[in-house]
Image: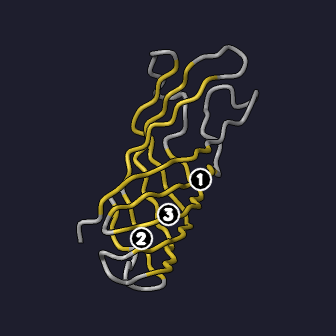
Amino acid sequence: IFFGGNRSGVAGLQGEINWIRKRTETELSSQAIRIDYLQVPVLLRLNAGSDSPSGFVAYGIVGPAFDIKIADEIEGVTLDEGFEGADVSLVFGGGVEVARIIVEGRYTKGLRRINKLFESFTDIKSQSFTILFGVRFN
């Protein structure tokens, strides 16, 4: 769910509420790790193109995101104390919007160590690339 963005202007502030699932495997033992977050990004959006809701616009976004952990799992086992309860990340991306249909790509780089287990062994920081498809209702 997103709101704002000032579609008809050059610049705007865009807020979002996202449910995100991040998955990976450890390099040493190939264990599957899954962490679910409630993510709240606050993004600066820069628009170029038509200001009509049915027109074409290309845009870029950048800003911080605040991630709150809602679940985690390693090889099917929940470890409530295995990972930090929150993360802060930077989001960079861009997209196009045509006739209220949105296609967007974004890169998210975590800024904090998210692992509590093995903290003396290694620091785990999240990063992801996402492709989003959406529909604007307003």
How are the residues colored? secondary structure
Residue type at mark 1 is Tyr
- The picture quadrant where one finds residue 63 is bottom right
Residue type at mark 2 is Gln
The residue depicted at 76 percent of the width and 27 percent of the height is 121
Cα–Cα span, label 2 and label 1: 16 Å
- Which of the two labelled residues, at mark 3 and mark 1, occupies the earlier sequence position? 3
From the viewer's perspective, is residue 25 above or below residue 70? above
Name the foreground residue: 95 vs 115: 95
Query: Which structural element holds mark 1?
Result: strand
The residue depicted at 41 percent of the width and 70 percent of the height is 14
- Which of the two labelled residues, at mark 3 and mark 2, occupies the earlier sequence position? 2
- The picture quadrant where one finds residue 20 is top left
Residue 56 rendering spot, x and y as whole percentages = 41, 74
From the viewer's perspective, is residue 138 above or below residue 67? below
Residue 73 rendering spot, x and y as whole percentages = 47, 24
Mark identifier at residue 107: 1
- Judged by depth in the image, the label closer to the viewer, 3 or 2, is 3
Residue beneath label 3, please? Answer: 95
Cα–Cα span, label 3 and label 1: 12 Å
- The picture quadrant where one finds residue 50 is bottom left
Residue 136 rendering spot, x and y as whole percentages = 29, 65
Query: Which structural element holds mark 3?
Result: strand
Quarter occupied by the N terminus: bottom left
Query: Which structural element holds mark 2?
Result: strand
Q: Indicate left or right for 4 with 30 as reference.
A: left
Label 2 environment density (alpha carbons within 10 Å; few <14, some 14–19, many ≥20): some
Residue beneath label 2, please? Answer: 14
